[in-house]
Every structure is written in C-alpha cells, then in structure tokens.
Image: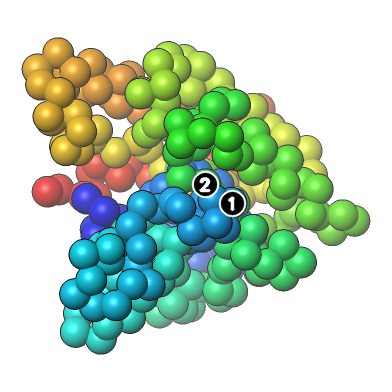
Amino acid sequence: MRNLTFLFLCLALFLLPTSYGRERLVVFGDSLSDIGNSFVATRGAAPPGQPLAPLGSPLRGDYGVTFDGTGAIFPGRFTDGQNWVDYFPRIAEQFHVDISPVTAWLRDPNNDNATDFAVGGSTSGDLNVNGALPSLPDQITAYLNGLGLKNAIDDLCVIWIGANDFGAKIEPLKTVANIKDAIAQLSETGAKNFFVITIPDLALTPQVKAAGGATILAATQFVVTTNVLLAVELPRFAFAHQIRIDLVDINAIFVP
C-alpha cells in the first residue's frame, strides 16, 4: 500500500468542492501523510533505510525512492517517492482549487507553508508507536502555537489518523473522541473546513496478514467500527460547532 498512498487522496479530490479554494492545506496524521517530520525528528533514522545511499547499495532503502526511471529521491516519505501531500496541490490546481505547496513543519518551522504536521507512528492519542515522537495532540499544539495572531479560517484542515490506534489498543470510541477533540481545538481558533479520512483496511497490510486469522478479524472489526462511528458522529459534531466536515471513505476509493 505504501506506493499507492498518494493515489487515494488524488482520487479523493473528486469529492473536494471547489468552494474550498483556501490558502493553505494543513495536515495532521501519521506515516500516510508524513513528508519529513519523522525524518527530521529522528535525524534520518525514520523512515527506515538509507535512501541517500548509492544506487545498488545494500544499505539503500525503498522509502522515498521513485521507481519511474528518473532516480528521484524524496527522503522522509514512508512511500515510494512522493506521497499524497506532495501531489495534492498540483492535482487540486487541475480542479481550479488554489492550494499552496506544503512542506513538513519540522523541516522549516518558520515557513508559512510548513503545514504538514503528520508524524509517522502517531496515534489519535498521546502515544506514538515509533517512540518518543509527537502524536496527534502534539501536532495540534504545534499548529496552534504557530498561528500567533492569525486566524485559521482560511485553512483547510485534513486529519488522517487512527491506523496505529489498532496496534496501540485504543478503542474505536476513544479514537473518534480524540479526533473530535482535535477538531474542536482547531475550530476554536477559527478553522471552519475539515477533511477527515477514514481508516484504511488494515487487514490488507502485510503485518496484519502475517499475524493470521484472529488478528485479521480484530483489525477488520476495529476499522469498520471506527469508520461507522466517524460517519455517525461527525455530521452531528459539525452541526453543533457550525463547521464543515467532509468525511472521505478511503476504502470506497481504493480497491486493491
């Protein structure tokens, strides 16, 4: 699934109303959206592998390497080459939606477009499964601290989180509550437009498939339950807070 991650969101653009057209894309999440924060925080240790090693080197990892004959390398991605955050502004332009290119927050914290706060291993709670790294609450705090006197009303906030909650044994109800809490904090600063992406089918991942039947069943139950709760809870939450939340069912878009 790594090398297809960007495709999920490019296709999801068909669901993105052109009425958004906001100034900035602000991203919160895990490795599915991380374009360099983990890489900076771990001084190049994560994602694993050494994408800057020479071609053919046994030390060379697949992460960030583009397999299209160009030899282009994008360190810090948990994908083959670029991920959806890299592609999103360019694809959005084709739909006449003006979104500035995004960079990883930790790469350049003073850059106004360093608005990808996603960190690989993040859960919806305080835990990062990859160690002492930021998770969703930390990402929200970093964004809020960087706002200063600015209003968040012109930001399109994308939240794609929860895949690591399964391994961290966070219950679906808590995952959804954490996501709603993050949205509430953002809305209090003026953010009005949110794009929440459901949890992908974890039963398709190599780690879960290798674990076998009981784990596959548990992963499926977690994903289905969490995504159903998101579909039920977010419209009510949006109405109560007078904000807009578009929920994208990633499993309806991506069919392996």
What numbered label is drawn on residue 212?
Answer: none
Q: Is residue 6 visible?
A: no
In the drawing, does residue 42 fall left or right of residue 15?
right
Foreground mark, 1 or 2? 1
Q: Helix, strand, or loop for circle 1?
A: helix
Front residue (pair 98, 104): 104
Residue 170 pos. (x, y %): 44, 17
Q: Is residue 69 visible?
A: yes
Q: Residue at x 90, y 56 (%)?
A: 149
What numbered label is drawn on residue 119?
Answer: 2
Residue 143 pos. (x, y %): 71, 49
Front residue (pair 154, 203): 203
Most distant residue in the bottom direction: 70
Q: Quadrant of residue 252?
A: top left
**Tag 1 residue:** 41
Front residue (pair 205, 88): 205
In the drawing, does residue 186 fall left or right of residue 127?
right
Count how many numbered circles sit on residues in the image. Answer: 2
Q: Residue at x 24, y 58 (%)?
A: 4
- Callout 1 amino acid: Ala
Q: Quadrant of residue 21?
A: bottom right
Mark nearer the N terminus (1 vs 2): 1
Crowding near pointer 2: few (<14 within 10 Å), some, many (20+)? many
- Asked whether the beta carbons under mark 1 and mark 2 sit within 8 Å of each other, the answer is yes
